[in-house]
Amino acid sequence: MSDCVFCKILNKEIPSTFIYEDDVCFAINDINPKAKKHILVIPKIHVESLNEVEDLSLIKDLFSAIKKINKQEGIKEFKTLINTGKKAGQEVFHLHIHILSD
Ligand code: 5GP
Ligand code: ZN
């Protein structure tokens, strides 16, 4: 989607360092970290939120990536978070999973 910040990052229109990438998703450090390590895992397809996910294999693939990212980054204790909808704190309407770790 043309005015979506995560699509722009994926398309290299906004510079960002990918700490992980596979066929389904990529991961970046959050620009405004709320923990010592704050990583965003973002599917390559533009899906607005969890409410719009039809094929739940996407979620399995994202969590499979999270396990690899955590191994790569030495993260053993962490929180995952998906904000869904404005009232729940979603700011970027392109599905993403937060990894938060101290
Ligand atoms: P949400 O509130 O939608 O669940 O989370 C969106 C997250 O994306 C926020 O934690 C915010 O700091 C992060 N974010 C927004 N714009 C950018 C950006 O351009 N680069 C990076 N790395 N993170 C961003
Ligand atoms: Zn997008």
Image (cartoon, rainbow, N blue to C red):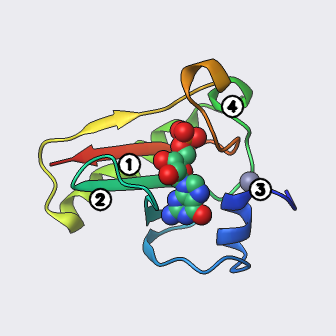
Element type where label 3 sits in the image: loop
Query: Which residue does the numbered mark 2 point to in the structure image?
Result: 68
Q: Which residue is mark 1?
A: 64
Point out residue 80 in the picture as x, y percentages from the top left corner.
34, 36
* Local crowd size for mark 3, using a 10 Å CA cut-off: few (<14), some (14–19), many (≥20): some
Residue placed under numbered mark 3 in the picture: 4
Q: Are marks 1 and 4 in contact (CB under 8 Å)?
A: no
- Which amino acid type corresponds to the residue marked 1 in the rendered image? Ser
The 10 Å Cα crowd at callout 4, few under 14, some 14 to 19, many 20 or more, is few
Q: Earlier in the sequence, mark 1 or mark 4?
A: 4
Q: Looking at the picture, tell me which residue is in the foreground, 92 or 42.
A: 92
Q: CA distance from mark 1 to mark 3?
A: 25 Å
The answer to which image quadrant residue 75 occupies is bottom left
Give how far apart the Cα atoms at labels 3 and 2 are.
Answer: 26 Å
Point out residue 93 in the picture as x, y percentages from the top left corner: 70, 41
Between disc 3 and disc 4, whose residue precedes?
Answer: 3
Whether residue 59 is visible here, answered yes or no, is: yes
Q: CA distance from mark 1 to mark 4?
A: 17 Å
Which residue is found at the position 43% from the left and 56% from the top? Answer: 32
Whether label 3 touches label 2, CB < 8 Å: no
Mark 2: which amino acid? Lys
